[in-house]
Image: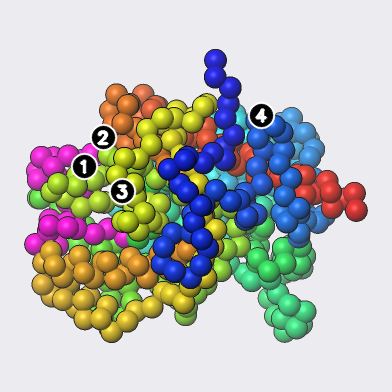
Amino acid sequence: MASSAPLLHYSPRFGPRKTSSSPSSPCSSSSSSNCSSWFDFRHGFRWNPCSFSGASNIWKHQSRKAHAMSTTQDNGATIEVVSSRKEEPDHLLVLVHGILASPGDWTYVEAELKRRLGRNFLIYASSCNTYTKTFTGIDGAGKRLADEVMQVVKKTGSLKRISFLAHSLGGLFARYAVAVLYMPSPSCSDLSDDLAVSTSAISKAAHSPGRGLIAGLEPVNFITLATPHLGVRGKKQTVDLSVMIQLPFLLGVPILEKLAVPIAPIFVGRTGSQLFLTDGKPDKPPLLLSMASDCDDGKFIAALGAFRCRILYANVSYDLSSPKHYPDMVGWRTSSVRRETELVKQPPQRSLDGYKHVVDVEYCPPVSSEGPHFPPEAARAKKAAQDAPSSENTVEYHEIMEEEMIRGLQKLGWRKVDVSFHSSFWPFFAHNNIHVKNEWFHNAGAGVVAHVADSLKQQEKQLESSAFIAASL
């Protein structure tokens, strides 16, 4: 049996790239961020001294062994409440489903994470944006998610850390929610003036210098699976509705998508316009562009930057895309936040040892950038895309917007994990395989879930080591 490979694996197809303010990708084999200190199954723990800054007594209970477990129900969603000796869990992991979905989509993932992660985690599958509620707008869904998370935090006083694992559209909901929940690290002057900040939140923020808190907790992991971070665009569409007929259950097959025309009007709503970047007035930036910056609508980049580790899982093929006739709905480019020129023609297909269908991992360090902007030419292109959504108008507008969104998001370091289901029995199920929506039909994604679980576990080990060293000083 092949031995398990370390999670941090770099394919020869990615050569070293310079970190600069140029629009080219900064991805390289260097591991210079907080989330790049990993546990190697072959060589043991890889120490990264930089990752120990900010460790404090907030982590002093992490190393205690767990022995009791209980399950409760809250608002129809399952909360896996796990006790550490006589204490409750201290790490909240929020699972956020995608479009037209429900907490039931996480059944396999919940069970597998509970088995692999141990008993310091409270695993909570969000239930506030089920089914058609996903059509009411990314901002509205994000606010509901933020409210739901706060309710969980208030009911569980033992929580110290928080992570998010989101699938598809849920990744955009989560990005909006964390901006709503974000609290920057307060300075001494801030503390004297802001009496609304709780003592516990101040204490936790003081132990997380320069990073801030999410829902009053230490942010650790932000992970998305097949999320359209750059929105959705078409290549040969002549009308808006033809773009909107790609649904997750149509598997990216053109003949099935053509049959979906009667239900296309469902997508002519707030979420649809936001995904296709046509929301709002022509002279105003679309929501997804705003979400790639810190602006009046929210501190979106600062909130993401507060997490120790950010990971993007992306399908290299078969993810609601049919390149000959239809757009990349949730394809490799948008879910991995890459430019078209950064995608190789022949993506890797060999799985990493121990993680079937996970074919490559790379770390992209942050790149300094002046973006994102909404230039006058973008406003003109947006108006043209809204008034006459032709192929030329739509593509021109999306190319401008995607470059600006990448400029904003690349200010943060990202770990990018490529997944390929080309050899699976049903490769067209890639979008649902990646999180094993149904254990019987989508079990090809079990290796991806194992990789996610081990990534979470290794970050937990890193935090425990940080706490141990801090306590020893």
Q: Are marks 3 and 2 in contact (CB under 8 Å)?
A: no
Residue under label 2: 428
Amino acid type assigned to the residue bearing label 1 in the image: Gly
Mark yes or no: residue 425 visible: yes
Task: Tell me the crowding category of disc 4: few under 14, some 14 to 19, or many 20 or more residues within 10 angstroms, Cα based.
Answer: few
In x, y percent, where is residue 260? 12, 46
Residue under label 4: 42
Task: Tell me the crowding category of disc 1: few under 14, some 14 to 19, or many 20 or more residues within 10 angstroms, Cα based.
Answer: many
| Image depth: mark 1 or mark 4 in front | 4
Magenta range is 231-260
Q: Look at 26% across and 66% down and name the residue there.
A: 398
Residue under label 1: 252
The numbered mark, 4 or 2, whose residue comes first in the sequence reads 4
**Furthest residue to the right?**
473
Residue under label 3: 331
Of residue 229 and residue 130, the one placed in the foreground of this image is: 229
Compared to residue 434, the image places residue 229 above or below, namely: below
In x, y percent, where is residue 403? 35, 67
Amino acid type assigned to the residue bearing label 3 in the image: Gly
Q: Look at 66% across and 47% down and name the residue there.
A: 37
